[in-house]
Amino acid sequence: MLLSIDWDAFSGTRELVFDAPIWGTRDRDEDRRDAWTVRVLKRGGHDWAALDGDFPLYPGWEALRAYAGVPAFVTLSHADAWTWLERFPGLDVLNLDSHHDLGSRSGDPTRVRPGNWAGLGLARGLIRTATTLYPDWHADLPVAEGHDLDRTRGEIRDLLPPALLDRVTLTRQARPGAALPDPARVTSLLLVQSPAWTNPAHDPAFLSLAADLRATPIVPPLRRPWAATPPAC
């Protein structure tokens, strides 16, 4: 099996943070850094620490160090996931993520993007079955996909044909670090930064994890040190 880890499963948000990207964001360069700078300035801050209260790093990511020794890759966005899938085609995929990535109602449905890479992988034979494992903290966040799994299952019925839906499972961790597979069962791991969705203050932890896993870069992740210059309007 393959294990995909989106950093947004850990670099998340609190309830009722209305400028949080979990409500929806594009994945442009400005969304990956400038939008986070704007969030700091709105909070009257002077560095990424201003985001700590609303955008925490949830526990559980430390358990991923158990996969050291498994062939691992790291990349910027799940839009790059097919480079990984094409190395290991036709396997079951477990995706620990804040989003199902099975399809989107916006954009070109035939182009691989962060929101549809898994659904297209199923449709084109690169993925045998797809399991979305939502993080445990979604249980306390009503806006999150993983809060109400029945609601989310209903939403994806319009995105995939029945034959593909039969190969999809949605579930949620009961606690941090739960429901992860035995490393001996994992053929390869993909670690995805998703910087439009993840707090820049958590980049050091992400990059440290990638180093611990000796992950080979597909597209190098970003290092986003604080820069005091506000983004251009």
Image (cartoon, rainbow, N blue to C red):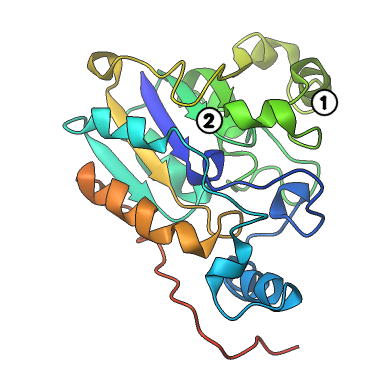
Q: Is residue 103 left or right of residue 180?
A: right
- Residue 110 image point, x, y percent: 66, 43
Q: Residue type at mark 1?
A: Glu
**Quadrant, the C terminus:** bottom right
Q: Is 120 situated above or below 35?
A: above
According to the picture, the residue beneath numbered tag 2 turns out to be 121
Q: Is residue 32 left or right of residue 59?
A: right
Say whether marks 2 and 1 touch (CB < 8 Å).
no
Q: Residue furthest left?
A: 69
Instruction: Please give the name of the residue rendered at 50% of the width and 28% of the height, measured from the top-left corner.
Output: 95
Instruction: Please give the name of the residue rendered at 57% of the width and 50% of the height, measured from the top-left corner.
Output: 56
- Residue 12 image point, x, y percent: 60, 46
Instruction: Please give the name of the residue rendered at 44% of the width and 32% of the height, measured from the top-left corner.
Output: 60
Res. 155 mark = 1
Marks 2/1: CA–CA distance: 19 Å
**Which quadrant would residue 123 be assigned to in this image?**
top right
Specify whether residue 146 is in view.
no
Describe the element under mark 1 as helix, strand or loop.
helix
Q: Residue type at mark 2?
A: Gly
